[in-house]
Image (cartoon, rainbow, N blue to C red):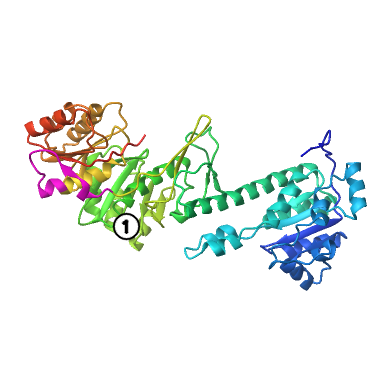
Amino acid sequence: MSLKPLDQLPEQPLNIERALLSVSDKSGIVTLAQALAEKNVEIISTGGTAETIRKAGITVRDVSEITGFPECLDGRVKTLHPHIHGGVLARTSHEPDLEELKKHGIQPIELVVVNLYPFSEAVSSPDVTPSVATEHIDIGGPTLIRASAKNFAHVCVLTDPDQYHRFLDEFQLEGQISFETRRMLALEAFRKTAFYDAKISHYFSGLVEEEVPEQLHLALEKSSSLRYGENPHQPAAIYGEPEKFINCFHGKQLSYNNYLDMDAALGLMSDFRDDLPTVAIFKHTVPCGAATADTLADAYSKAFSTDPVSPFGGIVIVNRPLDLETASRIDDIFTEIIIAPDFEPEAKELLVRKKNRRLVEIVNYPGHSGDKQIRTLFGGALLQLPDREPDLADTFRTVTKREPTAREKSDLLFAWRLVRHVKSNGIVFAGNGQTLGIGTGQTSRVDSSEIAIRKAEREGLSLGDSVIASDAFFPFADGVEAAAEAGATAVIQPGGSVRDDEVIEAADRHNLAMIFTGKRHFRH
């Protein structure tokens, strides 16, 4: 293919004499067509769009009249014709193109208005079949959009009803469309087709169950701009559909850091959604206390007692509708965000009195499969499947001489579910359905243990008869010995160290029960 680019793109305003309108979403199309007709713009259209415009009393020519060929294959082929694409792609400032148009009897088209078949909406239904989904893949629309956007120096392209008002303001005032406007609309058009193709690619990846794709395409529209990122000097925005998971119905706009904290909180509570009343308190994406009890109020008090200092300005998440008694206890200190599946009327009435505090309803928990975690880094991105699959207790094995008691086993399972949400090296001391000490984000597992023990001692929490969970194996016996000295009687960890025999021997020496899970839960 030989390309003969122009030496320079013409940047003068564009006069519009002919327009092609072919839209799936007909919102605002009659108003647009009426304004074009009032400026004596010839309107060409297809199928249902032409019918809508004609019913409004506006003169319109069918595409088939221009091409000399009827729409066919149930409307699959409408605009794919040289008399259409030649008119769109012609560089009307370039004399050889004008001569070719004249030779073939093609007239230029200066405005193209196209939006696409609603593919995303079609595949969002759980009952959609591949047959139905593929019928919602637009072919002619993206082709027209790309052709128009490529030739933005000579053509204006509109791809969304939200653009019509901006276009008409300029067109009705100036009678022309500026180069700068056309270039911006071309950028939006290329984004539109890229997003559309990425959605299709994502759907087909699901059909073939491709866990780690050969190419990574993100199809996320901006949900909203944020005041700033992690710090005030960092611009930020959120993309995607957070409203599918949360509904922030009271308080200030959620911040970048708020979203990170809530993602961590929802991830943890998804593991406890069907348990006894459970409360977790988060600070900087890390749990600083969690507990289960017969009531939410008692669970909150137990979780708070783990670390009464860190919850100030933190996040509280619960797995039951929030009642007044629990809300009153939470209200005793400044809490940034409160997250619950629902809020009882009396609790809501109390909590909304503080205007800036965010109240968030859980719409859905993150799924256990299908999603992908993506992290950007120098030169690209990392992708992994999330660590959300529940561990199966019947695959765990006791490796010490002593089996855990029923109480120890219950606390071990509680601690193990929590430690997967603590940053590595993660250590959790627990007992009686509550956290007693948490060590997180340290370069040494012993350091994490010491921090957890020190916090428990600071709050006057006894570690006698407690259990300890470690997100990864103990590389040396010293971690288990420190746990025993602190008062722990049982340990749960993945196992897999070359020194497992030494660690097991140390546990036996201290009469500890120890379970190997066979799976680690690192969080970097």
Q: What residue is at 50 percent from the left and 63 percent from the top?
A: 125
Q: Is 209 drawn above or below residue 60 in the view shown?
A: above
Q: What residue is at 51 percent from the left and 29 percent from the top?
A: 378
Asked where in the image residue 480 lies, by quadrant, the reply is top left
Q: Position of residue 201 (x, y in %)?
A: 55, 50
Nearest the eye: 188 or 439: 188
- Number of numbered discs visible in the structure rendering: 1
Q: Tell me the magenta residue range.
A: 391-409
Q: Does the image show residue 483?
A: yes
Residue 204 falls left or right of residue 371: right
Q: Position of residue 487 (x, y in %)?
A: 11, 35
Nearest the eye: 438 or 476: 476
Residue 41 falls left or right of residue 316: right
Nearest the eye: 251 or 65: 65
Q: Secondary structure at mark 1?
A: loop
Asked where in the image residue 517 lies, by quadrant, the reply is top left
* Picture quarter with the C terminus: top left
- Is residue 26 part of the magenta span, yes or no? no
Q: Position of residue 365 (x, y in %)?
A: 38, 54
Q: What residue is at 32 percent from the left and 59 percent from the top?
A: 321
For label 1, the residue is 322
Q: Is 194 drawn above or below residue 40 in the view shown?
A: above
